[in-house]
Image: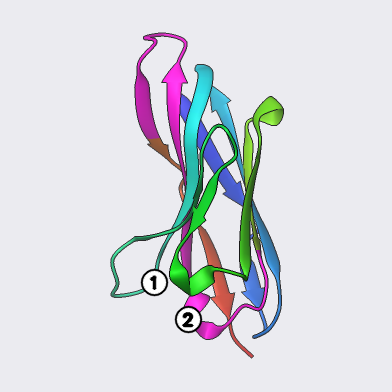
């Protein structure tokens, strides 16, 4: 089994910054894509940013130029640097990773439990 644990959420004023972290542990052979999703109240979960094993990143149009995703393969970590936050960024943010496990050798999709980001004055 693989566990993803997010941290770094909280309350921030408009225009502020936060850095989310996601660490993975468990039966990990390798990571493929990793990403961050978010879900605001009454809305569907949406992709915020994703990064391939090779480091290629893509972003939702709403966060381009403000958010940066990065990963540290040696530490099994993925990060989301969020700048110029506004109220529309308020949501629960979830870490996602496609992991090839040691036990089966197959790839599976894993999710963290989520971390709340609230942008408010």
Q: Quadrant of the C terminus?
A: bottom right
Residue at left offset 59%, top offset 86%: 120
Residue 45: horizontal and vertical position, in percent? 33, 61
**Considering the numbered disc 1 on the image, is that residue within a helix, a strand or a loop?**
loop
Residue 39 is situated, as x and y percent measured from the top left of the image, at 38, 65
Farthest residue toward the bottom? 121
Mark toward the viewer: 2 or 1: 2
Is 111 rendered above or below residue 40?
above
Q: Is residue 85 left or right of residue 36?
A: right
In the image, 119 versus 70, the foreground residue is 70
Render colour scheme? rainbow
Give the side of residue 103 with respect to residue 118, left or right.
left
Identify the residue shown where x is 49% and y is 54%. Answer: 58
The answer to whether mark 2 and mark 1 are in CB contact below 8 A is yes
Residue occupied by mark 2: 88
Q: Which residue is mark 1?
A: 40
Q: Point out the image quarter for the N terminus.
A: top left
Q: Earlier in the sequence, mark 2 or mark 1?
A: 1
- Along the viewing direction, whichever of 66 and 9 lies nearer the viewer: 66
- Measuring from the top left, give residue 11's x and y in whole percent: 64, 75
Residue 79 in magenta?
no
Q: Is residue 91 above or below residue 103?
A: below
**Image: magenta residue range:** 82-109
User: 10 Å neighbourhood of mark 1: few (<14), some, or many (≥20)?
Assistant: some
Task: Determine the residue positioned at 36% across, 9% down.
Answer: 104
Q: Is the residue 116 above or below the residue 62 in the image?
A: above
């Amino acid at each position: 089994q693989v566990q993803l644990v997010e941290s770094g959420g909280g309350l921030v004023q408009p225009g502020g910054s936060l850095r989310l972290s996601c660490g993975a542990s468990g039966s990990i052979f390798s990571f493929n894509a990793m990403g961050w999703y978010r879900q605001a109240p009454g809305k569907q979960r949406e992709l915020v940013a994703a990064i391939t094993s090779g480091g290629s990143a893509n972003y939702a149009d709403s966060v381009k130029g403000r958010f940066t995703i990065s990963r540290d393969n040696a530490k099994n970590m993925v990060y989301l640097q969020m700048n110029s936050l506004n109220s529309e960024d308020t949501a629960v943010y979830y870490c996602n990773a496609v992991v090839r496990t040691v036990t089966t050798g197959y790839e599976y999709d894993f999710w963290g439990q989520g971390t709340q980001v609230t942008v408010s004055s």
